[in-house]
Each structure stands twice: as structure tokens, then as C-alpha cells.
Image (cartoon, grey):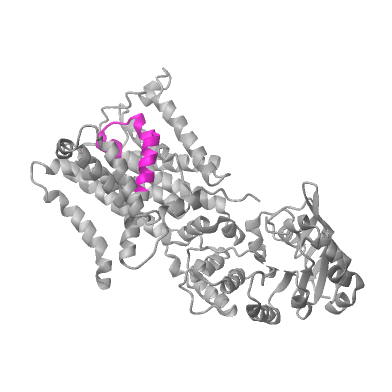
Amino acid sequence: MQRLRPLLPLVAIGGLASLPFAFAADTTRFWQGVFIQIFILAIYALSYDLLMGYTGMISFGHALFFGAGGYTAAILLRQAEPPSMLIVIAAVIVVGATIGAAVGALSLRVSGVYFSMITLALAEIAFILFKADDPKLKPITGGEIGLQGIVVPAAIDATTYRLRFYFLTLACMVGLYYAARRLINSPTGRVFVAIRENEPRATALGYNTLHFKLLATAISSTIAALAGMLMVLYEKSASFEMLSVNLTIQALLMTIIGGIGTLIGPMLGAATIRLLDHGLKGEFMQALLPAWLRPDLVFGIVYVVLVLFFPAGLMGAIRKLRGKTSRSSVERLRQAMKPKAES
Amino acid sequence: MPNVLLKTEHLSRSFGGLQAVRDVSIAVEEGSFHSVIGPNGAGKTTFFNMISGAIKPSSGKVFFAGNEITGLPLHRMIHLGIGRAYQITSLFPSLSVAENVRLAAQARGRDTFKFWQHSDRFERYHERAQAALKLVGLRGVEQVLASALPHGDKRKLELALLLASEPRLLLLDEPTAGMAANQVPELIEIIQQLRQSGQHTIILVEHRMDVVMSISDQITVMHGGSVLAEGTPQAIAADPRVQQAYLGELYDDVLTQPHEVAHDTNS
């Protein structure tokens, strides 16, 4: 078993790559769509875990980064003569990194729960601005209607080439996962972890922790922005919902359900939430469940049960099977929320 | 005449109305072992916090190797060559012993922003970490989590973190604090070895007189925030004011004023 472990990623990638061919012809298109969304949310959850699980910062404004990427792509692609996709990607990366650094610069003077509150406020400002029916803003943001009818370059159009788009998002997810993994194992990533563990000590060792926290925020934000861009390419629309607190909470839930600080866990969490959502809202469960038992209510119960029985998330449960211990989510959240003493 | 490595000039610090440190001027020669002693509440740790950059002085100046370093941010200090071990153990609890020390070694290098390479590829930090662990006698527990170490070993790890940073000046803040009595000699032995290696200048803060007498070149005795006496161990031992501070009325005075004890902790 131990010797087979290095093969696990290959098996997983192979499995996901052959998945579209496993479904019956009449449902495969639907399931491809579900998994495209899972892959995109997995990238988004991954970006959240970099910040929360590895650097120990809980952002309550992560939707801002996701939405920033989405709206950047949407606005560019709606131009009369849209720029090439490479330029769109470059713009999303630049906007993602800039917004991440800006949010970091505004909020990183404080830590713990104060950081969370400031990120929440900043994301809410963006949410309100993009939802506003203001005559000056609406031509750009689309207001409550959002930006509809986005023309995606024909070669990656998810309507005509659904399978191709499936592989594109799968490749993005795998690539970004490995990039994140590499970052975490690098000297830079080790300092992120040191900051999570004991920030004052990291400072005393000679690390300017503010720089590292800014970097972590910018990287996390960039990855979230790329996820937002993929979502817009898939949905062919951008809406203010992308900036909502609800989406931030999704990131938080996916990370907690999967296992904080494991990278792969939050990705599993994304799959769990998305599939659960489909299962609960599907015809089968709707027929089975009494009308008063709303899907959201069931999900809430499932979530509570998961946290109770898997206090360190799905990955924590897997580690436990292999005889390893993990800190519980509650413990990690408490640590991350605690404001560091300012000296 | 040897160089003065660290010098303070009229260093003072008050917290609100409380004058924790008052007009302290000391000069520490390169390669020497200088102890700062005094009863609890004498202002030793506050004085240390000002040298190490953890807090800024209300007035006065600090010079290191001839340059003024007053008020520089904490993270700059180690790069100048000033390292500090903490009275209250401060580690990275859920990282391994080896990784704790490796992070300290890495901080001094120039590879920290190489985010595309694996941290294991930088052998030199690993080696420096191993050397530091060997110096403090912590071998065979490299893969143990720092939080799982017994208290005495945590104190040693604290020291290893400091040594892996390769500072010119070591600030040791009560390194034996909270250790079981039978473990103290071992740690003193390690500190002795550091002194004999001749590579470091060491400033040691202690409230126990017996620890510092045998290993110090110079001793500064603090009391009530000010310097009470300064000199060689022999001179200090013979000084009637010191005897009084430690054994007589002054010490009693401190014992009956618990509020003075309160500010002698890490901020």
C-alpha cells in the first residue's frame, strides 16, 4: 500500500479524465457540467486554503477575489472587439494580484478576527457597487442583471465543446494544485506556515511577516480570480452573486469539510458540497423528502454531522485511518481568529 | 583594548506612569559574557526588549558594532547579528523540531523567496540546523513535533533556534526559566560551551545569582529599573549594595510590592 502511494495522483487524474466516458450518453453532458463546476470550485477552495490553512489568515472577503476575476474576464470579452484569450488571462492575473495586494495592504496591519472583519467590509463594498443601479456604474457592471451574453472564443466554448472545456478546467485544477503544493513546500511556503504557527516568533527569526502575508494574499487572490474567470467562461455571464458573502462562506465550508491546511481536502470539500447540492435538489430526493425539509436544511444537518464526526475534515478522517492525528477545524479556527499581540 | 559590540546610552522606558527602566547605560565588549541580574521586577526583561527591538525605548540610544540601532524593527535585528532566546518559550508548535530550527537558519539566507524550489533542496540550512541541534544536545528527536517535547527540551530547542540564526550577539533571557532543578546544570553546561567556543558575545539575563557568578566576565545588577552596580563577579559579590538588594531590605521591599513583578514579563 505504502509503495503504491506515489501512484495515487495518477490514478485520481486518470479517473477524472475518463469520467466523462463513464456516464450514459444522454446524461454525460449534464455530469460534465457538474464536474466542470466542481473543478472550478475546487480551484477556488484551494486558493482559500492557501490563505487560511497555511498562512493562518481567515478572509471573509474571498468572494471579492473570485468576482474580480469573473468581472474582469466578462468586461473584456464583452468589448466590441474582444482581446485575445491570453490577454484576458493576463488581465485577470494582474487584477487578481493587485486586488489581493490592495486588500492585504488595507487589512494586514491588524490580525486575527480584525483581519476577517476588514476583508468582509471590503468585499461588501464591491458587492454593493456591482449590484447598484447607478447610471454611471451600470453600463460597466450590468447592475442587478449582471453581464449576460458573453462571447467566449469558439475553440473553448463550453456549449459546443463541452468535453474540451471539461478537460481544460481539469487541467487548470491539476496545474494550480501542483503549483500550490510546490509553493507550500518551498522556502517561501515554509515561512507562511511559520506565520500561521507563531507570527511573533517568525518576526523575531528575521522574517518581515507583513511581506509574506501580502504575498500569500496576492497569490491566493490570483488563483481565486482565475477560478472566477473560468466560471464566467463556463456560465457566459457574470453576476453580483459572485461577490456575495454566500460565496465566501462556500469557500469556508468547502475548506472545513475537506480539512483545513491539506490543499487536497478543500478540493474534495468542493466536490462534496456540489454533489450533495445536486443530490438534494434532484428529483429523486425531492420525491423522497417531505416538503418542509428544504434542501438547505438537509445540507445544514449534513454539515453539522460532518463537523461533529470528522472534526479535522475528510482529510483528517483519512489521516486518522493511517494512524496520524490532525488538529480539529475548531482549534485551527480559534488559533487563526486570535488577534496577535501588537508590541 | 577589545571592541565594544553593544552599547546603551541612557536607555529608559516607561509604561504609563510606571518607569520600568531608568537611564541604563552599559557597554558589552566583543567576545565577553555579560550578565544582567536583579530581583523580579528590576526591569531586566524590559531592558532586553529594548536591545532586541521588541519594544522601543522612551528615550536613550542603542548602538551595535558602532551603529545606532535604536527603534529598528524586530525582524531587522537578526540580520544585524543580534539574536534572542525568549524567557517564555516561543516555538512553532505543530512543526517538527528539525523544521523549527531549519526556519531559523533559512531566515539568515537569501533563498526565502525562491518559491519554485523545494525547501529540502537547500542543504546548507538543514546542515546548520543539525549543527545547532547537536550543540544543544537535541539529537534523535528531529521529527518530533515541537509541542510534544518535554519542557526542558523545549528550552533547548529555543536555544537551538537562536544558534541556527548564527548571531554575533546572543541575548539569553532566563534560559533556565521553568526548568526542573535537575535539568538546569545541563543547560548551564551548554551555555558554558557557547562561551568557550569564543564565537559569540553573550548577554544573559537571570534573577538567580548562583547561575551567573561562575560564567560571567561582567555583571550588571539592576534594581527598580536602574543600574545598582556593575563590575566583575568578584566585585559584585563583595558589593554591600548588591548584598542588600538580594538579601536585605531592598529585596524584601520588592517582595512586598507585587505590582512591580507584573511588568517583568515579555510584552
Q: Is residue A139 left or right of A198 when viewed as pictured? A: left
The image shows residue B16, relative to residue A67, as above or below, that is below
- The C terminus of chain B, quarter of image: bottom right
Q: Residue at x 51, y 39 (%)?
A: A117
Q: What is the x, y in percent for residue A142?
A: 35, 24
Q: Residue at x 49, y 71 (%)?
A: B98
Could you tell me which quadrant the N terminus of chain B lies in? bottom right
Q: Is residue B116 visible?
A: no
Q: What residue is rendered at 40% in x and 35% in y? A: A245
Q: Position of residue A249 (x, y in %)?
A: 38, 40
In this picture, residue A335 sits left or right of residue A65: right
Q: Residue at image x 29%, y 54%?
A: A174
Task: Assess whether residue A251 is covered by the magenta stretch.
Answer: yes
| A128 shown above or below A89 | above
Is B99 magenta? The answer is no
Quadrant in the rendering for residue A34 = top left
Residue A341 place in picture, x, y as percent: 61, 51
Q: Which residues are magenta?
A: A231-255
Instruction: Determine whether, in the image, residue B30 is placed left or right of residue A58.
Output: right
Q: How would you classify the magenta stretch by its main secondary structure?
A: helix
Nearest the camera: A132 or B127?
Answer: A132
Residue sitting farthest toward the left? A25
